[in-house]
Amino acid sequence: MTKLLSLGELLIDMLPQDSQNSAYLPIPGGAPANVAVGYAKLGGKAAFCGGMGDDYFAKQLTNALEQYNVDTEYLFTIEGAQTAMVIVSLDESGERSFNFYRHQTADLLLTNEHLKLINWDKLSTLHFCSNTLTNTAIAKTTVCALKQAKNNHKLVSFDVNLRYSLWQNSNDIEQNVHACYAYCDIVKLSRDELNFLATQRQQSADAYLQSLLELGVKLVFLTDGPAPATVYHNAFTLSEAAPTITAVDTTSAGDAFIAGVLYYLNHSDNAVPLTDKLNDESIVKKALHFGLRCGSKACLAKGAFPALPTQQTLSK
C-alpha cells in the first residue's frame, strides 16, 4: 500500500489577478491539501483529512479535491463553522506573502473523534504541517494523529512550513514544533525556518539539525529558495541545486517538493520496504532530485492545485 493521508487545513486562497494585487480569485488551497493533490497528480493514491465549513466554499473545496482524485472520505463538514481564507500577495519576483482569516474556522475544529474513523490499514504515509499546531485544541488532535500513525507503523512526514502570523505567541512555536519530531521519519525545513527555530532553542543551525536526527528523524530536507537543497541522514548528507527557472508564482513550490519526495519514496523499487528506503543513500538522492524537479515546475504557473506538476509536465 502506497497511499498518502495528508492532515491539516483546506482553505480558500484569494489569489491576485494582476500585478497590483487589486483583484482576487478564490482558489482551493492549504499546504497539506496541496501535498495531497500534488501526490495524486503524480499518479499516487492520496486522501485528505481535515475540517471544512458548511458555507459557500464547501462544495468548491470538495469538488476541487475530487477533481484531482484525492479521496475525501476523511474531509469532515463542521456545522456552524466557516472555511479559513488567506489573501495571497505576490511581488515582482513571484514571491508571496500571506494574510490569514482563521479564527475558529473549520480546519481548527477537527477532533480525536474524527480520527477514529481513519482506516490506517489502507495507508502508507501521514503528512502534516505546523498550521495545525497553532492552538491547543488542534495541536492535541494533530499529536493524536501522529501517535496513531506510529502505532500503525506508518511513515510520518512533517513539513514545518511556518506561518508566523498564525501564532498568538511566537515564543510557543519551537516548543510545539519540537514536540512532534519524536513521531516523524521525515522533516522538511526552509533555511529561514531552521534559523528561527534554532535561535528559539538557543542552538546553532547545525546543532539543531543534529538534534532532530538524534530524536529519531531519519531524513531532514532543507530547502533554501533557489540555492541548493540538502538532505541530512545520520550516515550521509546530500545536496543538489534546484533547476534554474524564472518563477511566476512560488505559492506551492515547497508543497510540490515534498509531494514529489514522498511520491518517489513510496513508488520507487517496490522490492525494498518503505522504511528501508530512508536509509538507502541512492534512493534518497533520487527522491531529492525528483522533489526539486516538482518544486521548480510548480513555480511556472499561478495557483496551487493547477500549478502542481504531473508526470507529463515533468517530462517536458
Image (cartoon, grey):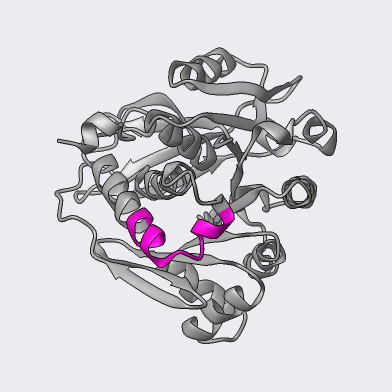
Residue 259 location in percent, x, y? 43, 44
Q: Quadrant of residue 222?
A: bottom left
Residue lying at 29% horizontally and 37% vertically, measured from the top left: 21
The number of numbered discs placed on residues in the rendered structure image is: 0
Residue lying at 69% horizontally and 61% vertically, measured from the top left: 180
Near-viewer residue (163 or 277): 277
What secondary structure characterizes most of the magenta part?
Answer: helix
Quadrant of the drawing holding the N terminus:
top right
Q: Is residue 38 left or right of residue 79?
A: left
Q: Is 283 colored magenta in this rendering?
A: yes
Q: Quadrant of residue 59?
A: top right
Residue lying at 49% horizontally and 46% vertically, measured from the top left: 271
Q: Is residue 28 left or right of residue 289?
A: right
Near-viewer residue (85 or 245): 245
Residue 26 location in percent, x, y? 42, 24
Residue 55, placed above or below residue 107? above
Residue lying at 66% horizontally and 57% vertically, measured from the top left: 168
What stretch of residues is rendered in magenta?
A: 275-287
Q: Is residue 80 left or right of residue 36?
A: right
Q: Is 156 colored magenta in this rendering?
A: no
Residue 228 location in percent, x, y? 27, 67
Near-viewer residue (152 or 93): 152
Residue 45, placed above or below residue 200? above
